[in-house]
Amino acid sequence: MNTIIENRINILRKILSEKNLDTFMILVEENRRYLSGFTGEDTAFDESAGALFITGTKLVLAIDSRYELQAKQEAAGYEIVCYKKGLANELPNILNALKTKKLGFESKRLSHMQYNKITGQLLSNGLQVQLVETEDIVENLRIKKEEQEIEDIKKALFIAESAFRNFIANNIIPGTTEKEAAWEIEKGMRETGADSISFPVIVASGPNSALPHAIPGNRRIEKGEPILFDWGAKINGYCSDISRTLVIGKPDKLFVKVYETVLNAQRMALDAIRPGLSSRAVDKIARNYIEKMGFKDKFNHGLGHGTGLAIHEYPGLNPIKDTILDKGMVFTIEPGIYIPGWGGVRLENMVVVRENGAEVLNSLDCAS
């Protein structure tokens, strides 16, 4: 087991002791990888690549036969338990071996159906185990990134930006469909070295760019209209996330005003970031400026979100949930303005909080 994972487990064990949990079951894919190095991916919400069981002295990774060899290769320090008839059926044996009396589980990942199966199996096997739902124990550990994590994010970002630069230089021409453009960007990322993409590439042109999460279609890109791109690559499990908006040819006056407003809002937010500042306060700086410039109710999502092993993780920068920013947090700053019938502009950079403020990780300038 490498030192980084060992340190994470030691921190987690202290938390479990404070919460009086003798065993913790981890089903969230990103949390499982963070604490074991096991890269198995869940193919659907009701299909799991495995579960970790962590106690004060023992580490168990339970998987089905598809992942047995992979788990043995990747999850150093873990006892590998291969179940034949599903996790719920194997759980009484695992918990009995671990002498579990109080089992913490991740409430966001365990479905009601799975919970009922587990409790039914425990009862039928005569095990007296208290199930305790928990929320965000590991996610709160992941919120501050180690330097190696930041380096992986930078690599993923470099690949994504390199692919986009190549696309702009060679493939962005009027008449290209949104689908064709999205594929060229995805293909470029994979050819440049991405392990995979962070999420389906967004290319939205003209009125479609007013949809923050538009799905690329057969609409052909035209001169003089907004074209919104949102894309990202993955390296070693870590995601990058970027948005840019551009125009082929000469932009109209509305585009210039909207773009400059979004760019200034982003710069103001970036300048404000520092350890100890409220995430809600950063969102408010950008949101108030956009409203002041005449675009009230046209910025209809949060200013940013954490990015790491998951494309969306803590902290969130929005008007709803507040987080005090701290060194090592990595997140996006992505103000946008969306006008139905015309289109939209979003500019997204990734930053890490350092002692003296925000370090922008992008090299692809929003202003160019």
Image (cartoon, rainbow, N blue to C red):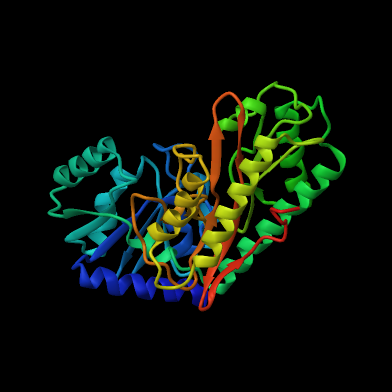
In the orientation shown, which residue stands out farthest toward the right?
170
Residue 121: x %, y % from top left:
21, 43
Instruction: Answer left or right for 148 relative to 43.
Output: right
- Relative placement, left or right, of 207 versus 72 is right
Q: Please tell me in which quadrant of the rendered image residue 214 appears.
A: top right
Of residues 136 and 49, the one drawn nearer to the viewer in this rendering = 136
Left or right: residue 344 compared with residue 251: left
222, above or below 28, in the image: above
User: How many numbered marks are there?
Assistant: 0
Q: Position of residue 9 (x, y in %)?
A: 39, 71
Q: Residue at x 59, y 48 (%)?
A: 261
Q: Nearer the viewer, residue 262 or 56?
A: 262
The residue located at (54%, 26%) in the rendering is: 340
The part of the image, by quadrant, that contains residue 99 is bottom left
Asked if 183 appears above or below 20 in the picture, the reply is: above
**Where's residue 145, x and y in %?**
50, 68
The one nearer the camera, 329 or 39, is 329
Residue at 28 percent of width and 39 percent of height: 114
Report the residue that reaches farthest toward the top: 218
The answer, for residue 153, to whether it is visible in the render is yes
Left or right of 260 on screen, residue 37: left
Evaluate whether residue 56 shows in this view.
no
Q: Position of residue 319 (x, y in %)?
A: 37, 50
Up-down: is 226 above or below 292?
A: above
Q: Where on the picture, by quarter, is residue 367?
A: bottom right
